[in-house]
Amino acid sequence: MQAVVNSINNIVWSPALIYLCLGAGLFFSLITRFVQVRLFREMLHLLFSNKESERGISSFQALSVSLSGRVGTGNIAGVAAAIGFGGPGAVFWMWLVAFLGASTAYVESTLGQIYKEEVDGQYRGGPAYYIEKALGWKWYAWLFAIATIIAVGLLLPGVQSNSIGNAAELAFGGERVFESAFGTISYTKLLTAIVVVSILGGIIFGGVKRIAHFTQVVVPFMALGYILMAVVMIVIHIADLPHILALIFNDAFTPMAGIGAAIGWGVKRGVYSNEAGQGTGPHAAAASEVGHPAQQGLVQAFSVYVDTLFVCSATAFMILITNQYYVSGVDAAVSGGLLAADVQANSPAFTQYALESVMGGGGKVFVAIALFFFAFTTLLAYYYIAETNVAYIRRTLRFPGGLTILKIGLMASVFYGTVRTADLAWGLGDIGVGLMAWLNIIAILILFFMSNPAIKALHDYEQQRRAGVESYSFDPEKLGIKNADFWKK
């Protein structure tokens, strides 16, 4: 199974996808004149300027739902894997893909807002919706919807829960084991799986509003707490900070780490973590109540900064500054760091050992708790995204019990992922991320050359902003944007 997954991954994550992610980010950065820098203050202002309604959630709630999907196990275990397999230089490429990806996030999230619909009293939208309405390619929209349901409903949840299980086992011990149909499992992992699945079921059966209200409280709290811990560790090792920065930048281009490995792992884990271009962000963006589509696009661009430049950097600095890592070379040689190669890089172990070196045994427990919140809120976001795509399919093909099947399938995936090995879970997750990224980035690039709706919306918003309007409005017909039926009403 692992060999099959690795073979598929080599095809999906070929250099072509890596260059597509970086190229699309650079292209949209140039086209928007680096909107991620020019309108940074506007992003902060918009975070709290829109309120929820009966049909939609607020910009901040949409940001929280989106961040709950972005800020997950990729920020802890994913960064560790990038360093373990790509070297410290991979961190630079994660930063670069985040900076450029912020413009891609603006484009896809604005499209999600422009082409959203009201379904059963709630706003729904995402790549499947804008692919059908803007491109007119219903077959391609269905392809994205089905790929997304499989990816976020079955493949990716196992990655999140696997990291929760591994962190719990490392923190609380995994000596007591038993034999099962899944192989040898520790009682710690089994108990963790039961707890996670039980809480998850209670929330996802409560609907979108419950997810939004839960994430708007938990996400800011967990992200700030984690970053604060990283700041404390950096202050303790402040004398080593210049050396760490030099290591990251030098290693990003040196043959020692292998430029291909650094770029490949940096981009792969960067896209997995911040999800820019992957097509997940537009689902939450479409659910928000805003006066102009560009507003939520800007808020979603800011979420990429929070994810990679803040949270991922916090993890990278904690690992590198305490030297709790290793770099596995092409010939299985190990260089750099204090850890031996028998520590799993595709797990939270690097981060847990880093904190343990400063906090003692409490470090592993802190990471286990942080990872629980990070990964758990990501599972909620995954469910919401999958539900939105099921709702899209049900517009054409109504089948009884579809959402119930989705909920049970996702919870089964979470249980299975918690007790299985990390490499298999990450391999399946990478396939899901890669397929969505291929389909979505190609779509938004074609959309730009066909009708350019996201850029038209940006120009319209900036004109109104310069004019100092008190209340923003959006008229798609005036801008030559077709099939934006929600905004025409």
Image: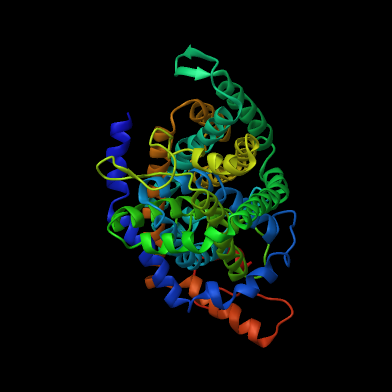
User: Dividing the image into 4 quarters, which one contains the N terminus?
Assistant: top left
Residue 118, placed above or below residue 485: above
User: Dividing the image into 4 quarters, which one contains the C terminus?
Assistant: bottom right
What residue is drawn where x is 61% and y is 52%?
Answer: 233
In the rendered image, residue 352, in percent from the top left (x then y), is placed at 55, 39
Q: Please identify the residue farthest to the left as the structure is shown.
A: 331
In the rendered image, residue 65, in percent from the top left (x then y), is placed at 63, 51
Residue 113 image-quadrant placement: bottom right
In the rendered image, residue 328, in percent from the top left (x then y), is placed at 34, 43
**In-image side of 266 versus 468 (left or right):** left
What residue is drawn where x is 67% and y is 31%?
Answer: 199
**In-image side of 407 versus 143 (left or right):** right
Q: How many marks?
A: 0
The colour scheme of the drawn protein is rainbow
In the rendered image, residue 198, in percent from the top left (x then y), is placed at 65, 27
Residue 87, placed above or below residue 6: below
Viewer-nearest residue: 9 or 355 = 355
Q: Is residue 409 visible?
A: yes
What residue is drawn where x is 42% and y is 60%?
Answer: 247
Q: Is residue 457 visible?
A: no
**In-image side of 268 versus 281 (left or right):** left
Q: Please identify the residue farthest to the front as the structure is shown.
A: 239
Q: Please identify the residue farthest to the bottom as the structure is shown.
A: 467
Viewer-nearest residue: 247 or 161 = 247
**In-image side of 457 versus 90 (left or right):** right
Viewer-nearest residue: 470 or 451 = 470
Residue 240, placed above or below residue 206: below
